[in-house]
Image: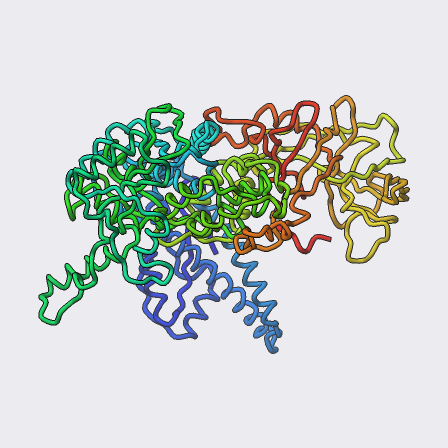
Amino acid sequence: MGEADSTTKVFTLRILNFHVRGGGDSIRHSLGAPELGPCSDGAAVNNIKQGPKAIARPLDLHSRSPKEVELVYLLLRIALAYKDHLESDSMADAAGGEPPKISKRAAEKEAKKAAARAAKAAHAAKPKSDAPKAPADPNANFKQGWLRGVYNEKPVKDVHTRFPPEPNGYLHIGHAKAITVNFGFAKAYGGKCNLRFDDTNPAKEEERYFTSIKEMVSWLGFSPAKITYSSDNFDELYRLAEELIKKDKAYVCHCTAEEVNKGRGGAEHGPRSVCKHWSRPTEESLEEFRAMRDGKYEAGEAVLRMKQYLGTKPEEYAIAEEDSAEVKKSKKELKTLAENPAMWDVSAYRIKKENYHHRTGDKWRIYPTYEFTHCLCDSFEGITHSLCTVEFETLRPAYNWLLEALDHKIPGSEEKGPMQREYGRLNVEGTILSKRRIQMLVEGATIGSKAATDDAEELADAVDEVKLAEAGDDNPVENAAAAKTTGGTGRTIPPVVRDWDDPRLFTLVAIRRRGVPPGALKKFVLDLGVTKAGADTKLHILDASIRTYLERTVPRLLLVLDPIKVIIDNVPDDFVEELEVPFDPKDAAKGTHKIPFTKTIYIDRDDFREVDNPDFFRLAPGKSVGLLYVPHPLFCESFTKGPDGRVAEIRAKYGEDQPAGKARIHWVGESAAHKTPVRAEARIFNPLFKNPRPNELDWKNGGYYDNINPESEIVYPNAMIESGFHEIKQKAPWPKEEGEAEGTTGNYSVRFQGLRTAFFCLDKEATDDKIILNRIVSLKEDTGKK
């Protein structure tokens, strides 16, 4: 049906003239075929039977669009399948009999074969272009959809974003999205992104968190334009707090947490009211604020509050029939603000009992809150687009209110100052992201043992915690209230994991230690998309994304997790056959290496059965199996067991005279000259909890511990790797992408696929003398493997 001219690179398609319910003409038209017009079914059949005599026209694929070329191939496949069918009919007619009966399935198979032949011929005939393909735009994900809309709202020339973590814990998988979005958005529009540490709570900040956050940003492949600290602005923030008081937009409050809750309607959501301090003169509030600064009050005894909408009465936004459309709109906006908890006179400054700060020392006893600091630091740094997760949408009115109150933003306009917009957060089912809960897993817990020494401060902070709790966290006020329980008679629960970087956790340091490449994590984030909707996904989808990424980027090695020794009796003791094998059969650039096939090899225990059965296709007594890369089969003659009752040794024969096996298995040869096998400990990680939704467990009373999966970590202490491991270790990182291409590497960058087993990396605790492997992710499940 088709011919290729390698000289002219012209593909000749003999277009078969048949009528396809009016669709044929449009297809021919798009291909540049001559106008044929509709014809009868008989004429169509006759034309098809003519074969080479059918109307033909050369098509120069150089000048065709990809869509047109695709239509050519599609029509060719249809024509081939239809022609084969008609030729069968013709043969039957010529023989003077009925056409042979063909089942529907047989016809479908034949059509598929014909289509495959056509596609192969078409691919061979397709013109090859010497011109290199234009590289894909790495910033394309940030120039479309929701992110494009955000830019269009404020299309400034110099885009400036920031990633502002609190240095009070390790980043988790959700932060990978925040980092990628903020840095990627700025880069896509030729801008820059700062890394800002929101260090306004000295009691919870540690140097290890600062260091880890910098490492994670670098590991993901991003370089901040500037590293800043909220604490660098403490003097200016204090000055603006006094300015806010002078404008009568802030006041010092001495209410207890219970009184504040009651004024906000309490648990019954009753009517709201301001406290007696709300109407105090500005001079008095200014004097009290300075007294807070100078040490007159203890933590929890005084708080500077912003005078927002707590004092707004329902009657102020009640809509009357006679109200104009403009008045109604204004009242609706007022009602929205008045009913938003983020606008209920939240705190701007509080006193901290543990007031030593890592950058400012003992200078300050009072510290600004997130709600006061965040938007102002955005303004100080010239941030144009303040991108955050969707739970901060309720805080946007407060963000704008403070900026407008201090003349850092024009009311109702995004022209001046930063613009906040919110995207959906990343949630992966089965993950624990709450810092408090991860700490319980890392350090253990004694239920009911917390002393009540700092209740006032904790409750004062908690009552104004209007940011939504981290995934899985309970209400912060309830948590603080629960801390009043004293005594040490509660249940003591031991640690469950090694540390914050245990590969069973989903902190970024844990994900890195597990061996997940930074590029795989970024691709996972971008493949899910960035929109207002939350990116809720299953754990197996994350695993599949990582697996796909590793499949094309890391080398392949032979590895046996639970080895059984195999001695081949029909070869000499010094038998060695060197086999040259690729590190990746699909990527020649990764190179090749030699492995020894010797008299003594090791196979995996899962590949042997003491008693054979017809559904088992691997090694068993009196049965053969193929070995990967080895030309001839291996035949099992006998086996012996060790003192533990398990198979310890197999005796076998090898050669072309052995019966062929139905499967091939992996193996590792024993050769001192080749430094093989490389002995290792392999750790297989599974979900930490039996319940796929661990945030629903009883964390208050320690019930979570009863749900720990006893097989969350399985250790194979005697694993063996082939000799190619030495070479891939020297050539790491695998792959050389993202931050690891710039030198942010460690043991975790030594990655490979263990054939028929899983993807692995070298653990951080591994040494030259003690190889420890972590399973990154399993291979794609093969439920049919026998």
Front-lying residue, 452 or 89: 452
Q: Please name the residue shown 61% across and 67% down the image.
A: 106
* Image quadrant assignment for residue 15: bottom left
Is 282 placed left or right of 555 in the picture? left
Q: How many marks?
A: 0
Q: Please name the residue shown 52% across and 35% down the image.
A: 509
Q: Is residue 738 visible?
A: no
Colour treatment of the image: rainbow
Q: Is residue 704 visible?
A: yes
Whether residue 369 is situated above or below residue 210 in the rendered picture:
below
Front-lying residue, 499 or 370: 370
Provide residue 535's location: percent of width, then percent of height. Answer: 42, 52
Front-lying residue, 400 or 227: 400
Front-lying residue, 99 or 273: 273
Provide residue 118's location: percent of width, then percent of height. Answer: 50, 55
Is 433 placed left or right of 316 in the picture? right
Provide residue 512's location: percent of width, then percent of height. Answer: 53, 35
Provide residue 746's location: percent of width, then percent of height. Answer: 55, 27
Is 220 placed left or right of 539 in the picture? left
